[in-house]
Amino acid sequence: MTAHAALVDARERKKGYIALLWVQVLFGLFPAVRHWAPDHFSARAIVGWRILVGAGVLGGAAVVVHRRAMLPKREDLPRLVVCALFGIALNMVLFLEGLDRSTPVNAALIMPVIPVFTYVIATLLGSERFDAQRGIGIAVALTGTLVLLLQRGPDLSHAYLFGNLLMLTNAASYAYFLVLARPLTQRYPPLVVIAWVFLLAAPTVPLFAWNADFFPAGAGSREWGALVFVLLGATVGAYLLNTYALSKVSASTTAAYIYLQPLVTCAADYFWLGRPLQEGLLLAAALIFTGLALVLRKRKLPPAAAAVVEGEARP
């Protein structure tokens, strides 16, 4: 790889890292927003709103921006359908049903396995090569997240077993989506990919939200304002930025940034809701950032391997 190509690649990856930081901010603020606004919308109604608004806004934007270029090739349609199933429909519904049968703390403890699942799936499918440094980085960041979340005391009793298994399946579903969507982001603009993923997920809404109250009578401006943030920030914005980042960096790197979400949530709890900081926060933050540094640090190739790469990059 030439020096110019390496510089361009580094700039593109940096754009992906910045997008991922914003994704974690938007997703990390979600719990605080839900606590700030009393819950008048059922979880199923919120999932239905997220899919339908995501399909409408992202689909409409893709048509305006890309016009006929929005149309995918016929051979890519099956992959897009599977991405819609695993990345949106199953992902959101499994999490919803699991959370109803478990606790928020258990959910917070299960979500950090997404990067682990992503790296394992990507390696098994040959999308990424095994790298010891990256594996250690994921393990260190996972440890930091658990240090933070275990302060709340998980409840892993038999009563919540089914709910925990549903959320564990949800984590594997989302990890598979990240690996599966990565090749699509190399062939189509990120907006086109995520628009089709939401559009193809829209027909599933009646299957789980047919009896949900989408317009509850008791909801006021505060509740509707919180829903707008969830729809435009934690859905349209977050998913679009996440797909953009996926076009710049690997699936396992995209997933690894999930470890930052608990730190964002804790910061929002402290500065916005006035809750005290949790014990072990500094240690958790140090471990998370150390782990991410290992994941993001580009390993230097030996001279012989670098010469091979340089030769392959020449026309």
Image (cartoon, helix red, strand yellow):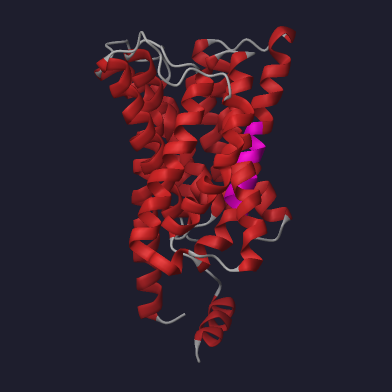
Report if residue 94 is visible in the image.
no
Residue shown at 64% from the left, 43% from the top: 85
Q: Give yes or no for residue 174 being in the magenta stretch.
A: yes
Q: Quadrant of residue 216?
A: top left
Q: Is residue 279 left or right of residue 97?
A: left
Q: Is 315 located above or below residue 232 in the figure?
A: below
Q: Nearer the viewer, residue 208 or 135?
A: 208
Picture coordinates of residue 76, whole percent (x, y):
62, 64
Picture coordinates of residue 130, whole percent (x, y):
66, 56
Q: Nearer the viewer, residue 79 or 64?
A: 64
Residue shown at 56% from the left, 72% from the top: 302
Q: Is 69 located above or below residue 274 in the figure?
A: below
Q: Residue furthest bottom?
A: 315
Picture coordinates of residue 138, whole percent (x, y):
56, 42
Report if residue 198 is visible in the image.
yes
Q: Give yes or no for residue 201 being in the magenta stretch.
A: no
Q: Quadrant of residue 214?
A: top left
Picture coordinates of residue 128, whole percent (x, y):
63, 59
Q: Is 284 located above or below residue 161 in the figure?
A: below
Q: Is residue 265 left or right of residue 103?
A: left
**The magenta segment:** 170-180
